[in-house]
């Protein structure tokens, strides 16, 4: 029997992806370290990674990997690391983007999603077409506009619906990605991306 640890759905076997939690300038701002927790795959010094989301992109070479103050040559899913990238200064990337294996994930601003509102006593508020929510996925927090399905005027607290979302900027997204959202400054519900739309 002896089942392999490397199951097809094991996140370590998937292409590298790390949401950027913070950016620290190095060498008087001429370089930067991008920190975060690796969500899938692994990364080595010398690998090329791509910035995805928030309207800016591009690829860069990993020159150093810092794992809790120790220099390592490789890091994998579940590790909190800092990546120093060649030729990328402190302004070259930001929290809310992801670093990923080139071409493995795209940035999208429009999608359909299955959402569920919290009960009213937990922060759920009525949502109508045109409601402006703040969406949270990976390390990003970004405003977007919701469109309810035809025939539904108002989604009430504790309600569920398939809605269309238009974010203010593209984020790294894929089908099946969970997210949370706030409405009027309070946690209001959660959802899952069901389909990516090209606009």
Image (spheres, rainbow, N blue to C red):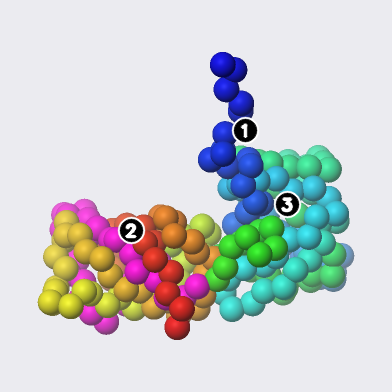
Looking at the picture, tell me which residue is in the foreground, 15 or 30. 15
Q: Give the spatial CA distance, label 3 vs label 2.
A: 30 Å
Residue at disc 1, secondary structure: loop
At x 73%, y 51%, the residue is 82
Q: Give the spatial CA distance, label 2 vs label 1.
A: 29 Å
What residue is shown with label 3? 82
Q: Is residue 127 magenta?
A: yes
Determine which quarter of the picture holds residue 68: top right
Q: Is residue 98 magenta?
A: no
Which mark lies nearer to you, 1 or 3?
1
Instruction: Indicate the position of residue 133 as horizontal and vertical percent values.
Output: 33, 72
Tags 1 and 3 in contact by the CB under 8 Å rule? no
At x 50%, y 73%, the residue is 108
Which mark lies nearer to you, 3 or 2?
2
Residue at disc 2, secondary structure: strand
Looking at the picture, tell me which residue is in the foreground, 17 or 92. 17
Measured along the vertical axis of the image, is residue 58 above or below residue 39? below
Instruction: Indicate the position of residue 125 as horizontal and vertical percent values.
Output: 19, 66
Instruction: Indicate the position of residue 112 as horizontal and vertical percent values.
Output: 35, 69
* Residue found farthest to the top: 1
Q: Say which label, 1 or 3, has the lower sequence index.
A: 1
Tags 3 and 2 in contact by the CB under 8 Å rule? no
At x 63%, y 42%, the residue is 13
What residue is shown with label 1? 6
Q: Say which label, 3 or 2, has the lower sequence index.
A: 3
For this view, does 147 lie left or right of residue 23?
A: left
**Residue 95 seen from this side:** no
What residue is shown with label 2? 191
Q: Which residues are magenta?
A: 108-135
């Amino acid at each position: 029997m002896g089942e392999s640890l490397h199951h097809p759905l094991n996140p370590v076997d998937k292409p590298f992806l790390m949401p950027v939690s913070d950016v620290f300038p190095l060498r008087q701002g001429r370089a930067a370290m991008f920190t975060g927790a690796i969500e899938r795959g692994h990364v080595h010094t010398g690998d090329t990674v791509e910035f995805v989301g928030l309207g800016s992109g591009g690829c860069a070479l990993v020159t150093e990997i810092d794992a809790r103050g120790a220099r390592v040559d490789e890091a994998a899913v579940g590790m909190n690391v800092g990546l120093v990238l060649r030729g990328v200064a402190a302004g070259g990337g930001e929290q809310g983007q992801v670093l990923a294996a080139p071409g493995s994930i795209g940035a999208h601003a429009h999608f359909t999603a299955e959402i569920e509102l919290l009960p009213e006593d937990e922060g759920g508020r009525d949502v109508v077409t045109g409601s402006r929510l703040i969406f949270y996925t990976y390390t990003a927090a970004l405003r977007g506009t919701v469109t309810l399905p035809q025939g539904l005027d108002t989604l009430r607290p504790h309600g569920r619906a398939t809605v269309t979302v238009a974010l203010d900027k593209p984020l790294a997204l894929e089908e099946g990605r969970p997210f949370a959202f706030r409405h009027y400054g309070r946690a209001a519900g959660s959802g899952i991306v069901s389909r990516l739309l090209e606009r």
